[in-house]
Amino acid sequence: METSVGVIYYEDNRNLREGISFLLQATSGLELLGAFADCLNLEEEIRTLKPDVVLMDIDLPGISGIEAVLQVKSWKPDAQVLMLTVFDDEEKIFEALRNGASGYLLKHTPPSEIIAAIFDIHQGGSPMTANIARKVLQYFQQQRVSRADVYNLSAREQDILKGLVAGYSYKLIADELFISIDTVRSHIRHIYDKLQVNSKTEAVLKAMKERLI
Amino acid sequence: METSVGVIYYEDNRNLREGISFLLQATSGLELLGAFADCLNLEEEIRTLKPDVVLMDIDLPGISGIEAVLQVKSWKPDAQVLMLTVFDDEEKIFEALRNGASGYLLKHTPPSEIIAAIFDIHQGGSPMTANIARKVLQYFQQQRVSRADVYNLSAREQDILKGLVAGYSYKLIADELFISIDTVRSHIRHIYDKLQVNSKTEAVLKAMKERLI
DNA sequence: CCTAAATTCACATAAACATGCGATGAAAAA
DNA sequence: TTTTTCATCGCATGTTTATGTGAATTTAGG
């Protein structure tokens, strides 16, 4: 059983690459399998070196670090990718994370923390700076902005809409709420007006997407 | 302009509360506005003490820390809530974060890091342990895993299902795919069989909830 | 008090949908 | 080669929805 964590490092800035490489080599428990300036031979490098952790600069020439993540994960799905970036650009962060990166650090992070993060990520954690974590959280929280009152749905209309979202037919909703089916029809007409739709499916989709219920 | 960060602390364990309280008081740049064992007077405390940061144990007797987050955010939306917990229970994490918490630390985090996290959160970061960050990421990544194959939907059936999820009528789907409306019917029959539903709305709901598309 | 919503109900008709029972040809699997 | 699955189409029938029109009662706001 190997005890050290195999690392590959992609970084186009030579000084930085050599500096961090030296640090990685000097750290017991880590094994630097390779350090490269670009991802031109990514596939072969991943296949032959079989890294546990890939340290990846996000702004690489040629194939960007973001695309590279996808490739790393497709060739070695259990490899953990830790992104390094100078700027915390929201779009790039999300793209990289969606592509399968597991951690995200700013380059100005102290070297000791980068080392710690490599061990972290290898043990199943997702090291990221508090700033980046906040952006992820916001994306994840941004939801409940739009509420039912935006569309001025009355309480009863929301009841009916809940029934629709539950997948009920008009008749079931009527039974559920102890009202006639024509009343249900009437409410649904008003709901459609307010949501600007004209079918059950569209209303349900809008309700789900905008979390009106 | 006040320079210190006002903190309120909720923790039912007396020893822990007094220990951390002492630490908070001794830290320059922080001002401990209050430390309480429960959230029974949460509203008043938030209103009168106007904290910048609320340090909240997740497992409080009476009103749980998770519900408390919602209340804190409703009475002082710009207050940042930092959750503290012993176990990293996935459900509780997500509930707290959905309710508006901005950070999440395990209780065994070293006191120095808790202090650092308070400053972090006040400056717009979201401090969280690597383990918790991983869970958030996974939730956020779990999306694009087309589980359509779980139900053995054929490629064409997925096309039609996409049409339904887009809110199209049979006729529109038929036009879109250059097939007859009867063919659409036929595919939809098979989709219903495979998904075990019997209406457009149910199929759409299932597709959305389980991210089949 | 008056008006505007909201809630309830009714009748009617056309459109859309669900389902049953077929069928054909092509491609993939056995 | 035979069988199975897929994708395509048709017809028929009953059910559910969408929409028009109208109206009585309750509730909330000006």
Image (spheres, coloured by chain):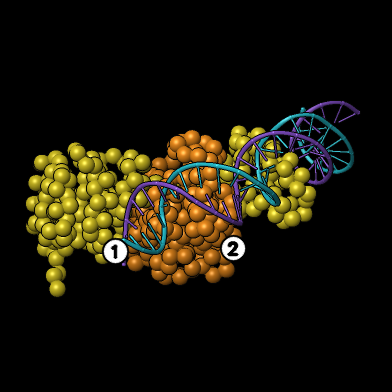
Chain colours: A orange, B yellow, C cyan, D purple
Residue B102 place in picture, x, y as percent: 30, 55
Q: Chain of mark 2?
A: A
Which residue in the structure is indicated by mark 1? Answer: B124
C5 lies left or right of A50: left
Considering depth in this image, is B154 or A18 the residue closer to the camera?
A: B154
Q: Disc 1 sits on a residue from what chain?
A: B
Rendered location of residue A160, percent (x, y):
47, 45
> The residue tagged with tag 1: helix, strand or loop?
loop
Quadrant occupied by the N terminus of chain A: top left
Q: Residue at x 44, y 41 (%)?
A: A2
**Viewer-nearest of labels 2 and 1?**
1
| Drawn side of residue A41 relative to residue A117, left or right | right
Q: Amino acid at mark 2?
A: Leu
Which residue is drawn at the image coordinates 24% and 45% (left, top)? B65
**Is residue B47 in view from this perspective?**
yes
Above or below, B73 against A38 in this view is above
Which of the pair B59/A102 is nearer the observer?
Answer: B59
Between the C-alphas of marks 2 and 1, the distance is: 38 Å
On the image, the x and y values in percent for residue B55 come to: 20, 52
Residue B207 got which mark? Answer: none
Identity of the amino acid at label 1?
A: Gly
Number of other residues with Cα within 10 Å of mark 2, as a class: few under 14, some 14 to 19, many 20 or more: few
Q: Residue A40: give its label.
A: 2
Q: Secondary structure at mark 2?
A: loop
